[in-house]
Amino acid sequence: MPKQKFRYSARKVECIGRRDGRGWQYAFWPFKKEMPVQPLDDQQEQASFDLELYRAAEDDLADIAISWSEEDKVLKNQYCKSLVELQMATEALTSETKDLEFAKKEFDQAEDEFEAQRQPPISHRTEWMWIAFLMVGEYFFNYIIFNMVGAEDLETHIMALVISATLPMSAMYLGMLLKKADKNILEKWMALVMLLVPVLVLMGISLLRAALFEGAWTEDEEAPPISPWAASMVFIVINLLIFLVGAVVSYMASHADPETYRTLRIRMNRARKRFDHESRDHQQASRMYQKARIAYEKAKHLRKEEFDIHQAMAFDLIKKARLYISIYHDANIGVRKNGITPPCFKEPIPELKVPELLMAASLDWSCDPNIMGLNPFSKTGFNQN
């Protein structure tokens, strides 16, 4: 803020008015010194003290305008920088909004097409849980059976692992083939092979082991209470049940048109990932826009506030100068012995004008695109005022 040169008070101005109007002043109290009244009784020109007040007010008004001009260099620079950031944030948000709308439209379309397909009653996750459970059960069951028929420990583990891995997976593949609507010749033969081969292999393994170990169990005094043929039948039945359960689970988890179903599911998952990515980008752009908007409003408000303060100072100074001139006139006339009002006091008080820099119309909110780095071809629209 500028230091004011207009250092007058109403009391001081009144004292000066009485001193100039009474025609004397104290030389050495209580002695008085005669002096001509000011202004003269017939003076046409403006009183010297009026001019003093007027010039002091004009000087202060000029200082206020200069002070505002210096402060506005910084304030407008901050305002224009915030305007640039807001414009960039607005363009980024507009672009991200368009990308988000396109990604959402694409995801909604992919989701609708995927959901239009008849969904399997069992999900793939549930299917794999069942297959894993069947593999574990298959392993322990076959391990027990092979131990009962007298197989070596290493052989028992190997056979149990092989059967527990191949049988449920074969059942899974068979269920997928059976559920498929449009099967070609190869797939039909594959389904028949997947149905017959596991059954024949299981029967062959069972019958072969029953024949090989029947004699050993007969000669063994501590043979188990189950015959080789009974163990073979249990082996075949349990494994066939496990195979059937795996095939049914796979059938219920498969789709009649697996290629189309898989394609639509992949497309929907990709569309969802893109939509999620665009949503995060849009949220980030929205936060940047809000931050830039707040900074812009803050810079704008600070500049307007400082302008209003300087403008109010100018108006207050003009009112104070006119008031003090009136006080001077009244005090001066009140103490004149002849009661004459000088002609210069009858004239209207000279009008003090607010400097043009402090007028509202001079507060320029435009920013030079070349100097401030603004994009003159930007299509974003927001009110700078």
Image (cartoon, grey):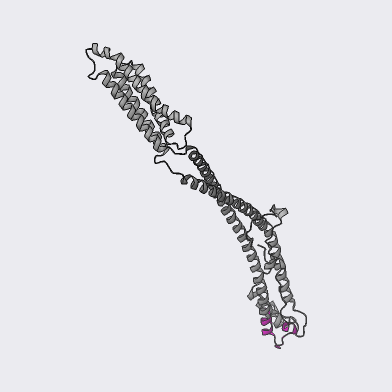
Q: Residue at left 37%, top 28%?
A: 135
Question: Image point 35% across, 23% down: which residue?
Answer: 202
Is 105 left, or right, of 148 in this rendering?
Answer: right
Q: Position of residue 243 (x, y in %)?
A: 36, 29
Q: Nearer the viewer, residue 119 or 187?
A: 187
* Front-lying residue, 382 or 50: 382
Q: Is residue 331 left or right of residue 234?
A: right
The answer to whether residue 323 is magenta is no
Q: Whole-percent x and y of residue 48?
A: 75, 76
Image quarter hosting the C terminus? bottom right
Drawn side of residue 96 relative to residue 240, left or right: right
Along the viewing direction, whichever of 14 and 152 lies nearer the viewer: 152
Q: Residue 79: x and y, percent?
A: 65, 57
Which range is magenta?
328-346
Q: Is residue 30 visible?
A: no
Q: Quadrant of residue 133?
A: top left
Q: Is residue 189 above or below residue 79?
A: above
Check residue 334 for magenta coloring. Answer: yes
Which residue lies most toward the bottom here?
338
- Kindly tell me whether residue 155 is visible in this rendering: yes
